[in-house]
């Protein structure tokens, strides 16, 4: 793997040490699949040089004062949400697109001088770190009340927006469903050598490993990660894992479920040769991941920024998430998710609160110690 450098997320390279892998996106891929590390890192790098200005990267909005959104979510979904918010309120939003970890690290470095008004993260650990560093403002009670308390900030500093579930994508021609492991820990066993694929440098991998850490402790987690290091074929991101399994290059792969649904939407059912499997008995491998948003304490437009976050969890915002081809679950249970998805209650998924999942720092150290990056 080509290493692009260490993140200083959390202020300490040794504690966070999340290695970001760079690759060139395939120009033949559609915009929905072209979410490579290079594009995200370039967006964050270019914007970092503009941190002292109000000009945004990658986003639109009317001339004049605008909200600045640091966006770690998928760009197409965020574009739909921003467009609907602007039409409803007349408030302009400019978007800076990047990996959640890169953007959170940038906010830490910018501190009270950050031009960002809102941070929309793909996973909760980045929000937990910003919360712990005192960089997020308290959300209004009316906003927090729209979301189950297990899916927002324990201190009320950010709110959950969308959910995904960890899963195993598999090729039925290479391994039958009956042969699939009952626990994610089983993938460290020798019989899975060369048959499992992972993306350890994808931002979605640390929360999965964090679920294992919470459930089993650091010693078992390190042993599991070392087993993956011996057994796994590594890819740069979970999209690549899903595609490799679908091509028959490897038997199984650890992903968040939405990557498989996006692949099937992209290729069509006839060209989808893989299937999805959820670990039973609420195993740590099928943990729920929370995408969330918060207003920066340093924002100069707090009222408008709060309106944007409130819109994300409003029925209108949640319906946009539900009907999108991003295949994430809305956090509002009254909003029916995309019809392609099974009801989340029907999946035996592990549920961890943001506090239980933590801020990724300990698990990132374990991932590095195991030699997965």
Image (cartoon, rainbow, N blue to C red):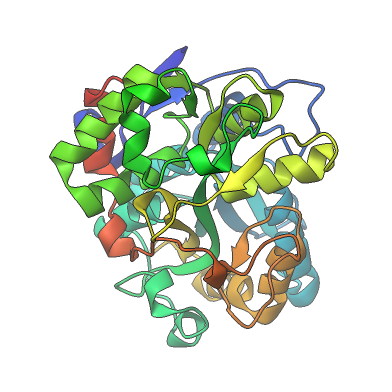
The reply to whether residue 110 is in sight is: no
Residue at point 65% right, 64% down? 342
Front-lying residue, 181 or 87: 181
Q: Quadrant of the C terminus?
A: top left
- Looking at the image, residue 205 sits to the left or right of residue 90; the answer is left
Q: From what the image shows, is residue 85 above or below residue 23?
A: below
Front-lying residue, 220 or 338: 220
Residue at point 73% right, 20% down? 26
Residue at point 26% right, 25% down? 226
Q: From what the image shows, is residue 48 above or below residue 304?
A: above
Where residue 201 sits, quadrant-wise, is: top left
How far across and down, in percent of the image, does residue 101 sit? Answer: 43, 40
Front-lying residue, 146 or 261: 261
How far across and down, in percent of the image, does residue 46 sit? Answer: 57, 30
Q: From what the image shows, is residue 343 above or below residue 203?
A: below
The reply to whether residue 302 is in sight is: yes
How far across and down, in percent of the image, does residue 186 sit? Answer: 34, 37
> How many labels were placed on the picture?
0
Work out which residue is located at the far left of the displayed protein and give it: 219
Work out which residue is located at the far top of the displayed protein and give it: 2
Q: From what the image shows, is residue 363 above or below residue 368?
A: below
How far across and down, in percent of the image, does residue 251 sit? Answer: 56, 27
């Amino acid at each position: 793997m080509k290493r692009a450098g260490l993140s200083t997320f959390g202020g300490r390279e040794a504690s966070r040490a999340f290695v970001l892998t760079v690759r060139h996106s395939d120009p033949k891929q559609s915009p929905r699949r072209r979410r490579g590390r290079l594009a995200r890192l370039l967006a964050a790098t270019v914007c970092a040089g503009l941190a002292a200005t109000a000009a945004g990267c990658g986003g639109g909005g009317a001339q004049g004062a605008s909200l600045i959104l640091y966006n770690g979510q998928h760009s197409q979904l965020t574009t739909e949400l921003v467009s609907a918010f602007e039409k409803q309120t007349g408030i302009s939003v400019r978007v800076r697109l990047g990996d959640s970890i890169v953007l959170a690290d940038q906010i830490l470095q910018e501190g009270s001088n950050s031009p960002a008004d809102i941070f929309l993260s793909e996973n909760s650990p980045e929000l937990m770190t910003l919360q712990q560093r005192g960089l997020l403002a308290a959300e209004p009670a009316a906003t927090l009340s729209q979301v189950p308390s297990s899916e927002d900030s324990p201190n009320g500093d950010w709110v959950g927006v969308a959910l995904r579930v960890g899963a195993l994508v598999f090729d039925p021609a290479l391994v039958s469903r009956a042969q699939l492991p009952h626990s994610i820990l089983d993938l460290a066993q020798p019989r899975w050598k060369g048959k499992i694929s992972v993306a350890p440098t994808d931002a979605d991998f640390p929360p999965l490993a964090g679920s294992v850490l919470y459930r089993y402790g650091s010693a078992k987690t390190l042993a599991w990660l070392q087993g993956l290091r011996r057994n796994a074929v590594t890819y740069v991101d979970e999209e690549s894992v899903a595609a490799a399994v679908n091509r028959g290059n490897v038997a199984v792969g650890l992903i968040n479920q939405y990557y498989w649904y996006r692949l099937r939407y992209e290729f069509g059912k006839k060209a989808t040769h893989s299937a999805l499997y959820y670990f039973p008995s609420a195993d740590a491998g099928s943990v729920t991941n929370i995408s969330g948003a918060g207003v920066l304490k340093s924002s100069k437009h707090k009222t408008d920024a709060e309106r944007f976050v409130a819109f994300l969890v409003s029925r209108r915002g949640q319906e946009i998430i539900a009907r999108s081809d991003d295949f994430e679950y809305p956090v509002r249970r009254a909003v029916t998710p995309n019809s392609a998805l099974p009801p989340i209650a029907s999946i035996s998924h592990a549920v961890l609160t943001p506090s239980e999942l933590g801020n990724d720092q300990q698990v990132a150290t374990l991932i590095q110690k195991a030699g997965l990056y």
